[in-house]
Image (spheres, rainbow, N blue to C red):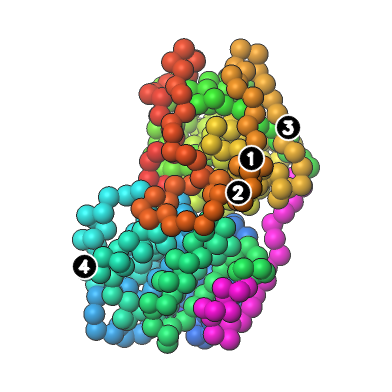
Amino acid sequence: MSFTDLNLDEQLLRAIQACGFTSPSDIQKQAIPVALEGHDLMASAQTGTGKTAAFVLPALQRLLNNEPAPGHGPRVLILTPTRELATQVTDAIRDLGKFSRLRSTTVVGGMPYPPQIKMLRQPLDLLVATPGRLIDHFESGRLDFGRLEMLVLDEADRMLDMGFVDDVERIAAALPEQRQTLLFSATLEGEVRNVARRLLKEPQRIQIAGVKTNHDSIDQHIHQADDFRHKQALLAHHLGQEAVSQAIVFTATKRGADDLAKQLREQGHRSAALHGDMSQGARRRTVEQMRRGQCRVLVATDVAARGIDIKGLSHVFNFDLPMAAEDYIHRIGRTGRGGASGTALSLVGPQEWDKVARIEKLTGCKLNRLVLDGLEPRQPEPKPFAQRGKGGRPGGYGQKRRFGGNNKPGGGNGRKPTIHHKRPAVGGRPRSAGNGQG
C-alpha cells in the first residue's frame, strides 16, 4: 500500500513526498482510512510506529475538505501529556501541512502567556495543547470551542498516569457533542478503556503490536551523573575513545542539541546538531554528512532523528533520557544493525531514575551500571520515586493533581542539582541541556 492508496488530498501527498516518506506504517494503513470515514477511533500503538502522522493526516484532510463554521476557535484540538510531545505533533503539522494555508498554534506549560493569548485571539484551524495550560486559558474565557470538529487524545495512557484524567474529561465536556474523537495509547485497557467509553461514540478499535525487542547485539550501560558538568565529563571521556567511530548523542530539546553540538565542536569533535527547527533540506544535508563520515558526532532530538539509518554507527549516547521508555528502544536501535554490534550509554541525572525504572520494566532487564575512575558519582544511586512511599506513580507524580502552567517532565521537585565547578567539562556554562524549547 502507498500513501496514494489512502485517498489523501494532493497537497498532503506532496508534503509526504517532500518529507521523504515512502510508504505508510501499519498504524497509518489502519487508522487513516477509519478516521477519514468519520468514525471515532481508539488505537493502540507504541511511540515510533508513525502514530503522529496517523492522526495529523486525517485532521489536515478534514480541515482542507470541510468548510469552516463561523468564529475563530480551533477546529481540531490535539491534547498531549507533555510539552515535548506537543512539540513533536506541532513539527508534524508544520511538515505535513506545508502546502496548505491552515493555521495552527501550541499552548503548553512553561511558556509565557502573552504570545499564546495573542494566537488564541486569531482564527485557528489546529490547536495542540497540554491539558493544564489549556484549562488555564479556558477558565479565563480565551477559548471558544463552538466550531470544534475533532478531538485527538495522544498518548492517553500517559495523560492518565500523570493525573490529567479530570482535566481531559472537563475539556471534553466543553466540546460539541457532534465531533469526531481519536484516542491513541500504548494500551487500551484499564482506565484508558473506561475513559474511552465515556468520551468516544461507537469507536473502532485498532491494535498494533508493540516495539519491545531484546537488542542482543547492543551493549547497554548507564552512568550515574551528579549534575550537568558530570554528564559533560562522562561524555567527553567516551568520545575520546578510539572505539567510538561515529555516534548519535540524544538530548531532550532543540536548544540543548545546538548547545551541546557547539561545545563538542569547540573541543575538536566533528559534530553537528539535528532537530525540528532545521529545514528539511538542512536536516538531509546533516544526515548525509554523517553518512559520508564528514561528521563523527550527531547531537539530535528524538523527532529529528526518527527514521534515519546510518551504517556503522558504533555508539548511541543518551545525554538526556527520553520521557517514554519506548523512545529509549528506538534510540538505541540506531546502532547494532545489520549483524554489527553496538554500544548504548545513558547518562542518568538525579531526576531521571524513574525513567530508568520504566526502561528496565519495559525491556525486562537491568541496565549495567558503569563507574569510571576519577569520575565516580558522589552520591549512592537513588531509588525510583515509586519505591519511596505509598501512592507514588512511575515518573514521580505521587497523586492526582492539576499541573496548571507547569507541565514539567520527570516529576522532580523543581530544585536544580548542585553544580561542582571543579568537575572537568566538555565546555560551556553549567546548565541543563533540557532547558530549551523541545
For marks 4 and 2 on the same chain, the one whose residue lies earlier in the sequence: 4
Q: Amino acid at mark 4?
A: Arg
The picture places residue 144, in percent across and down from the top left corner, at 28, 75
Q: Is residue 246 visible?
A: no
Direction from residue 381 to residue 15 in the image, left or right: left
The picture places residue 238, in percent across and down from the top left corner, at 60, 23
Towards the viewer: 373 or 99: 373
The picture places residue 410, in percent across and down from the top left corner, at 52, 44
Mark toward the viewer: 4 or 2: 2
For marks 4 and 3 on the same chain, the one whose residue lies earlier in the sequence: 4
* Residue drawn at point x = 40 percent, y = 38 percent: 435
Q: Amino acid at mark 2?
A: Gly
Q: Amino acid at mark 1?
A: Arg
The local secondary structure at tag 3 comes to strand
Q: Residues in magenta?
A: 193-215
User: How far apart are the alpha carbons under marks 1 and 2?
Assistant: 8 Å
* Residue drawn at point x = 71 percent, y = 44 percent: 360
Towards the viewer: 268 or 393: 393
As drawn, the label of residue 368 is 3
User: How far apart are the alpha carbons under marks 4 and 3?
Assistant: 52 Å
Label 1: few (<14), some (14–19) or many (≥20) C-alpha neighbours in 10 Å: few
Residue 155 lies in quadrant:
bottom right
| Image: 427 above or below 167 | above
Q: Amino acid at mark 3?
A: Asn
Provide the residue designation for mark 4: 121
Label 3: few (<14), some (14–19) or many (≥20) C-alpha neighbours in 10 Å: few
* Residue drawn at point x = 67 percent, y = 21 percent: 371
Q: Are marks 4 and 2 in contact (CB under 8 Å)?
A: no
Towards the viewer: 23 or 377: 377
The local secondary structure at tag 1 comes to loop
Provide the residue designation for mark 1: 388
User: How far apart are the alpha carbons under marks 4 and 1?
Assistant: 45 Å
